[in-house]
Amino acid sequence: MSSRLAACSLALLLATTARAADKDKVGNFVPFDLAVCFLKPTTIQAPATDTALSGLWILARPLVLECMADTRFFVPGKSPAFKITLTVNDAGFTQTVDSDGLTAFGKKCIQDAVTRVSPTLAPLPAGSKPATFSEQWPELPPTTQVRFGTNEFSDVTGTVRLALPAMCPCFAPFEKGPDPAAIGLKVQLTQAPEKFKAGDGSLPPPVLVTVADGPPAVKTCLTPKLTALPYPKPKSDQIVVPYEITFLNSVADSTDTGALPDAVRFAQLDAMAVPRAATSQLELDRKVKSSDAYNALVKQYQDVAKKDPKKAKGMLKDLVASCKQMVAQDDVYIATLENESKLRQEQLTVVTALGAKNAAWAPLEAAAKKTASESEALMNKAKDLKTSDEKVCPKVHL
């Protein structure tokens, strides 16, 4: 697993434990990434490569994390760690999930996550070396998982949390960001309504959901959907369960986290880095292909020049155009790295401020410094590569 995801896991651990600290009877406060609602298929320039498949897997991670939040997909007594392998060969695109700790439904959830962000990947030419990518995904902290059977309160909150993907239409106002504040709600379940008869003789409904926060349109949309959920039958005559839906939004346009609790701010920025990393990886794939195309044309030009200099001269226009395309793709790749590096610097600023108030953030501060430095180094390396590419372009006037 990459350091990026490891940082995200630790950030989520801090966020979830902070939200559950004063709720000793209620658990399952697992943040919901709105990317689950809004992620769309990407584009990959043919042919598929190892690099492109890596970018595809990074892009799918918010969806995969949602799969791994559902412990009903786990085989009891075994680790849900798994190995993912993506392959494109002359027969087409395949993916495998190897794990003895995930059920068939869990494996399918992960495969569906990849499929959702994947474009149609054409088979490679017959006899081509397959493009492949694989990664070992470890077991994540328990606080990133929804668990049932702890108590009746947590069973209710778990039901709410795992139903959120089905409520994506309600979250449409949040798509572009910034990441919204948590939405507080209460679920009242009544088994014996006659014991709670009001003064006017009215009886409470079996399920009463009160959504306290959020835009009016979101509250109006959520309330009937939450009321209709199949809640577990409580043991008590009536229970009232408080819950907060904590959001992340890795696909948000805005990096403004000022309105969020400290425990969520870093996690939000770390989540936003994932699709940016996927974009950088996919642009790297296009950059490599543009360089390969130019180098192949240069070799062709050199071979022709040995036999027919006049004909080779006629290729100069194509050489210049190909080299310009290579440099232009350098610019696109650099822009994606600059975007990622800027976010990492913002993340470092946030976690440094948090670390000054709470020593528990020290491990994340150290990780953020390392990641920000690596991101900047990668960006500078890409800029140096562009300079080298510009130097090899033919200096001719056509």
Image: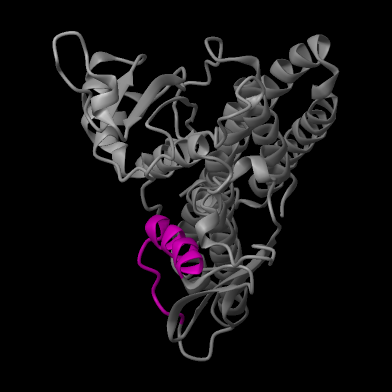
Stretch of the chain drawn in magenta: 105-124
Q: Camera-side residue: 209 or 373? A: 209
Q: Is residue 114 toward the left or the right of residue 195 in the image?
A: right
Residue 382 visible at all: no
**Render colour scheme:** one colour
Nearest the viewer among 292 and 222 is: 222
Looking at the picture, how far across and down is residue 55, in whole percent?
56, 55
* Residue 245, percent from left and from top: 45, 27
Q: What residue is drawn where x is 29% and y is 15%? A: 215
Query: Dividing the picture into quarters, in which one does residue 357 lie?
Result: top right
Residue plotted at (84% across, 30% down) = 363
**Residue pictured at 21% horizontal, 22% vertical:** 220
Image height check: is 349 above or below 222? above
Q: Which residue of the protein is positioned furthest toward the bottom in this rendering? A: 127
125 lies above or below 31: below
The kind of secondary structure the magenta stretch mainly shows is: helix
As for residue 108 lying within the magenta part, the answer is yes
